[in-house]
Amino acid sequence: MDRLYADFARNSTAPLWTQTTDLMPAAPAPAAVPHVWKWSELLDIARRSGDLVPVGRGGERRAIGLANPGLAPTAYATPTLWCAIQWLGPRETAPEHRHAQNAFRFVIEGEGVWTVVDGDPVAMRRGDLLMTPGWCFHGHHNETDEPMAWIDGLDVPLAHDLDFGFFEFGPETVTDTSTPPISRSERVWAHPGLTPLSAQAPSGSTPIAAYRWEHTDRALAEQLLLEREGHAVTVEPGHAAVKYTNPTTGGDVLPTIRCEFHRLRAGAATAPRREVGSSIWQVFQGDGRVTLGTEERALTTGDLFVVPSWVPWSLDAETELDLFRFSDAPVVEKLQYHRPR
Amino acid sequence: MDRLYADFARNSTAPLWTQTTDLMPAAPAPAAVPHVWKWSELLDIARRSGDLVPVGRGGERRAIGLANPGLAPTAYATPTLWCAIQWLGPRETAPEHRHAQNAFRFVIEGEGVWTVVDGDPVAMRRGDLLMTPGWCFHGHHNETDEPMAWIDGLDVPLAHDLDFGFFEFGPETVTDTSTPPISRSERVWAHPGLTPLSAQAPSGSTPIAAYRWEHTDRALAEQLLLEREGHAVTVEPGHAAVKYTNPTTGGDVLPTIRCEFHRLRAGAATAPRREVGSSIWQVFQGDGRVTLGTEERALTTGDLFVVPSWVPWSLDAETELDLFRFSDAPVVEKLQYHRPR
Amino acid sequence: MDRLYADFARNSTAPLWTQTTDLMPAAPAPAAVPHVWKWSELLDIARRSGDLVPVGRGGERRAIGLANPGLAPTAYATPTLWCAIQWLGPRETAPEHRHAQNAFRFVIEGEGVWTVVDGDPVAMRRGDLLMTPGWCFHGHHNETDEPMAWIDGLDVPLAHDLDFGFFEFGPETVTDTSTPPISRSERVWAHPGLTPLSAQAPSGSTPIAAYRWEHTDRALAEQLLLEREGHAVTVEPGHAAVKYTNPTTGGDVLPTIRCEFHRLRAGAATAPRREVGSSIWQVFQGDGRVTLGTEERALTTGDLFVVPSWVPWSLDAETELDLFRFSDAPVVEKLQYHRPR
Amino acid sequence: MDRLYADFARNSTAPLWTQTTDLMPAAPAPAAVPHVWKWSELLDIARRSGDLVPVGRGGERRAIGLANPGLAPTAYATPTLWCAIQWLGPRETAPEHRHAQNAFRFVIEGEGVWTVVDGDPVAMRRGDLLMTPGWCFHGHHNETDEPMAWIDGLDVPLAHDLDFGFFEFGPETVTDTSTPPISRSERVWAHPGLTPLSAQAPSGSTPIAAYRWEHTDRALAEQLLLEREGHAVTVEPGHAAVKYTNPTTGGDVLPTIRCEFHRLRAGAATAPRREVGSSIWQVFQGDGRVTLGTEERALTTGDLFVVPSWVPWSLDAETELDLFRFSDAPVVEKLQYHRPR
């Protein structure tokens, strides 16, 4: 028997019967753990990085990743998702590059940075969701005397672990330094239900480079108003939510990442849920609590938390509570691993 | 031989060889003809109908159909499309009904009528496109002391000739007489790129009951501005255009009807085009000329014209020229009859 | 009032209120009527046509269409479907042509003709379904000293009335006179669940030029056997049925036409059904009865009958009863007119 | 600076700038390495496992996984795919279970085992591909006095690392011990281009439980014959190949795994190719060589090799060379990471 097991190893093989339970648990048993990051601490560490670490070619971005304690030594937030706080000092530029990996940015405070996506300058402002689909060149430049911080979301762990990614350097400065209030992509695409007749075939990624806070805010406010008027449009009582969508398909904004925004009335609570696949939330505004599995944690503006696959979660709002969420739900659904059981 | 031909008839049969050329011409040879209807004349006849003909159960609508001279004795505008001017007098109500046939309304002047679609009151204003997808109950009521006229577009000829249609009477008065400035459907759905998380599966018909003029106007203006700034977003020089779309799919607003809006700069002209399938245009504003086949006709605000299948058309704008268009393009494309040759 | 009605006509318009009931009935009210054609009579008339009428350029085909008595003066079987018996004498050739209209042939007796589809010779034998998707060149040649008859099915009425069709003459003789037992298309595509790796994108029409009787027969036999063994695979007790499908999509063989084959055990009966859209059936073998609306008619091998939209139909099998069916169901479904109510 | 880096760790964060190159390489830089496993060695080790290790509840399967040397300590063949040789002794039973993970088996020699998939007994014979889509109960039983070996392919690494998997035990013996030559699924579904009319909506996994060697062999033979006759149906000269497909969609057999079979004429060689995503090949029959990156290795019947993402591969056939292949191509394509650059 010992010789057999030695021969397994010698032949680059391994018996299934010693591994079944770990490899194929009854339900998802993530190595990733539920975790909360405090915005105040992230902001502090980002600011200090801004003082000490230059931004530029090679390092590319002054971004500090949320490293799930269960996934050490990687800096992954979940097995599929990367999330980082990025810091850009006054008048700084993060050089252009592109990658097959899909990316977005979400802003909870500040303004004055433009991200230039395939030559289209996109202003970044509080509450905005900015898209950088795979293989678009992009760089950032701060046109003010104030630093700015935001979060980046990418499918870097997925692309890295599955060996799907490509990367290419672009110019060291952004290709268009103009600072229009809205991007060309929005001028063409961000009209409700209207598509340019010159548009080509539907794309797997959204053509809208910026989803502006004013629209998100209004959509959520209307849902809660309609609920009060007696119409069933919320997810559950006191819980409004929107999905950011690709207007060419009605589907998700990116092939691998779903983005949502949730608003809870003060005092509202969500029913406990659990889902196949992982997600990351950021409190945009307000105070409340999240229960992740059996543990309850306080939340305030800017705090981030991760929900690994199949971990039950629920939210309680003390004040009106606004949260941004992104997840790997498109991966789960396209690979048909979402079926309820 | 005579006996053979007599037996064809006697047996409810007919030889192909006597019919091939008509049945299967080298290219579409429509019975429908190009035709222009003058808005001034339609409005006059509609006003007189308003004076003489009541609206109510049975007749259902005070609508006057554009009867293509080539399709007599029907009142079809094309083999697939119905188009009518509808007139609703001060304080009148057109009772509720529903039909499997798909419908929309487009407004070139006036306001003060609400169309109630499955219980959702939808204000009708200049430049708006109002949707009534198949099998939605709908009625109209005029809340003012002024009459109002608009055009209706439906796929009634298609459904009638192919025996696909169903019809059901609803209440004689509208189910909700409130007069909100925008419909509930817009409050839920008409936010660019945002979908309620509570939404069900994608639908073949748009959930947006009203596409408002302010959005259409802005989208067209931006296209022309972007063109001036050197970006290729127009159909051709000086010719901006949008397609109204279903946000749940990115596709057409109705399963059988495509709706578009076109804007030509003053002095612009379109290249001659011809397409499989028929369409109907209405000048929303401005002066110009249309060439249909070999005939050129003057156009002014409100005028309607029909382009039968495969008839070459082109437009010349004297002033800035805005036009609404609807067509059976979804039918052509879904049945894969659109392939270029 | 008279002047108003005169002005309607003068302005190429027509009031809806005089037409609502006919235009938009409560349920489909087809002009087409249920009808049965006896195969013996069709065969007789086709044989006599063979004696009297040449086949060749211009007339193109010696095909005798089933002319629905309700659709006179057209020779349409239904508003969307054309069905004809085609007769090809010994050693005759029907010249090549192509059309955007979709076509198939179904053989209930005889053999010895090859249809050449875009250069691929396809043997025609009893029980086979032969496909000629839109815009494929095709001609037929009889390599024997016996005449052969079969039925043609096309969407000619649909394409004609909607102005979608194109037609082009090809060579007067077929481009390949070889007589292989199976076509190249079958050698590449007619293997269960196997697709050539070199295949391009999915197509709206099947790449299989011939669906052979041996496969259809076996599939139906297995369904009835499995039913006897206690497994639910039939449509209803004693009623087996298959849909011919496009292996690149799993959907219908043609963009506008569905083809099916049904087998009833001797003594079996179907529940009454009615559907939106029209269909045509041919008895392939056996004796029975069909009820169309309220009228019952006897059926024997070769008989054809038409079921207009929304007409209830049911079948009773005296012997084992095999029937081929084709319908416009893809049109109904793609245009979303199929929803049950 | 040291304090900053300490604080990164203390706050469960990590700077991107120290990781960019590894995390986001210019092109996929797989940890997995190209590797060849000799069938003779696998068979020997499997036989010895058969002598020493029982099969039954808990261990579930006597399966020995191919452990990619670059992915230690896991037993993954690639980051997405698991591949094992499974051994079932005379009269043995592997108990029933089910999992959300997708699985198939491929047989290069032997027969006499039935795999029972959701109650349907499926005979396993040389050259057959047997499907076990996610969440189908399945067990295996050997009805002979000879052992049998085959390979299993699953998406276990993907489901494990992304936390998508579920697992459930079933009965300890198979639910149907009958031994029909073909499964019920084949009797219903394995007819070329024919679908039971009673079938429900298209499914993401194939309903065909067994793709039989006789069909695969014939399809490949026809491609090579057609090539000789001058028709372009092979992948490249002397290289025939089929994709196993789901007849309800025309797409891949499983949501995450593509299965193919390739045949090279003696003396043929493939052009070097590289693809995003990983694949595993098994020589079904013949002798040849594979070049993986810069290394060339000899191959004979039964040998397996793995091609990590973006590693160039090519094949040379000494004899006629038949190979089975499976890959994660559906994952790459659905997540839109396949775009050529």
Image (cartoon, coloured by chain):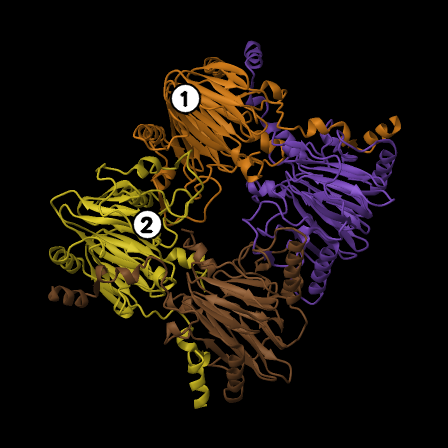
Chain colours: A orange, B yellow, C brown, D purple
Instruction: Give the position of the N terminus of chain A as an image quadrant.
Output: top right
Which mark, by number, is residue A284?
1
Q: Amino acid at mark 1?
A: Phe
| Mark 1 vs mark 2, CA separation in Å | 37 Å
Q: Residue at x 56, y 42 (%)?
A: D334
Across and down, in percent, residue B74 comes to 27, 67
Instruction: Give the position of the C terminus of chain A as an image quadrant.
Output: top right
Dot 2 corresponds to which residue? Answer: B241
Judged left or right of residue A186, residue C272 is right
Judged left or right of residue B231, residue D265 is right
Asked whether A78 or D277 is in front, the reply is A78
Q: Secondary structure at mark 2?
A: strand
Across and down, in percent, residue B155 comes to 33, 57
Query: Callout 1: residue from which chain?
Result: A
Across and down, in percent, residue A36 comes to 51, 17
Judged left or right of residue A270, residue D263 is right
Query: Callout 2: residue from which chain?
Result: B
Regarding residue C16, the answer to whether it shows in the image is yes
